[in-house]
Amino acid sequence: MQLNYKEYIISNPAIMLGKPVIKGTRITVELVMEKIANDISMEEILIAYPHITRKQVLACIQYALETVKNEVVYTLQQA
């Protein structure tokens, strides 16, 4: 069953300048993805941020996946 990230991730211009965050926190999806990209394990993330859950971290990953999946890249022709 696929996790519905929309239950856990919000974007509000009044919170972190509108960056997507874990609901009820100021922890951005960007921060979580940066930790993962820097080889920080799920367990280490949960220890560092004890007020978030495994499902919330997975929601960040799902959000990032959906964002990249829907991204369109346009090739510019050089003159």
Image: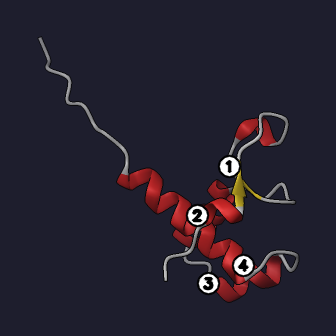
Q: Which residue is mark 2?
A: 33
Element at badge 1?
loop
Residue at the limit of the structure toward the bottom, as seen here: 43
Q: Is residue 73 above or below residue 39?
A: above
Tag shown at residue 30? none
The type of residue carrying mark 4 is: Ile
Question: Residue at 73% of width from left, 38% of height from top?
Answer: 18
- Horizontally, residue 66 falls left or right of residue 23, namely left
Of tags 1 and 3, the one toward the viewer is 1
Element at badge 2?
helix
Q: Mark 2 or mark 4: which comes first in sequence?
A: 2
Q: Which residue is mark 4?
A: 45
Do the residues bearing badges 3 and 4 touch, measured as CB atoms within 8 Å?
Answer: yes
Q: Is residue 70 above or below residue 44?
A: above
Give residue 4's position: percent from left, percent from top. 58, 68
Q: Which residue is mark 3?
A: 41
The answer for how far apart the CA atoms under marks 1 and 3 are is 21 Å
Q: Mark 2 or mark 3: which comes first in sequence?
A: 2
Do the residues bearing badges 1 and 2 touch, measured as CB atoms within 8 Å?
Answer: no
Of tags 1 and 4, the one toward the viewer is 1
The answer for how far apart the CA atoms under marks 1 and 4 are is 18 Å
Q: Which residue is mark 1?
A: 20
Res 46 → quadrant: bottom right
